[in-house]
Image (spheres, helix red, strand yellow):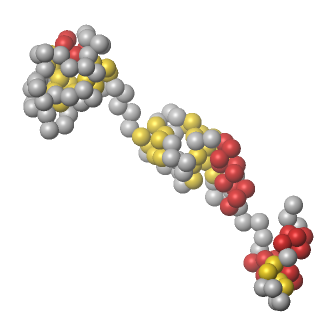
Amino acid sequence: MKNKQYKLLQKYPSLPGDWEVGMVVALVDSVVKYSPIVSKYCNYKISKREVENFPYFWEEIDKKIPEFITRDGVTIYEDDMYYFVAKDWSYGSMYALHGIVPNITFSTFELAQKYVKENKPKFSEKQINDAIETNFQFTHHLIDVESFKETLKIK
């Protein structure tokens, strides 16, 4: 059975004085009473009926546990879709599964695609060294960018 949790939306007179809007309670005592989940509040218990039948004061909260956070900062939960980049630089989408945390993830297809474009190796060390040697102008210590791009065939 799922252990329900509720968040206090608004205080009312019969609540303990230290209970605050936003605090969370969970079922305790053989699932007939609710009590705060944080020890800073007094350990007062209120009836299940008082919490579950008054949505003006209490809101059930989803207790989904985050699976991971993507490189662009989005929290992914089980069954959420995300985009990944594989070791072979291919990319695609998947639904999150509990306990499986991929290495390179994003919240959008475009971000995964951009990551591959910006990070996938395109040239060998020899090609880069040859291009630098061919296009380095010793007098100004600058690289002729257009010649460098042409040597590497960059558009």
Q: Which residue extends farthest front? A: 140
Residue 26 spot, x, y in % from top left:
22, 27
Q: Is residue 24 visible?
A: no
Q: Residue at x 52, y 34 (%)?
A: 80
- Seen from the viewer's position, the closer of residues 62 and 147 is 147
**As drawn, 122 above or below 110:** below
Q: Residue at x 87, y 83 (%)?
A: 134
- Seen from the viewer's position, the closer of residues 144 and 35 is 144
Q: Is residue 80 visible?
A: yes
The quarter of the image holding the N terminus is top left
Examine the image and state in which quarter residue 25 appears.
top left
The quarter of the image holding the C terminus is bottom right
Is 98 positioned to the left or the right of 14 in the image? right
**As drawn, 29 above or below 89:** above
Is 109 positioned to the left or the right of 66 in the image? right
Q: Residue at x 65, y 47 (%)?
A: 111
Q: Residue at x 78, y 70 (%)?
A: 123
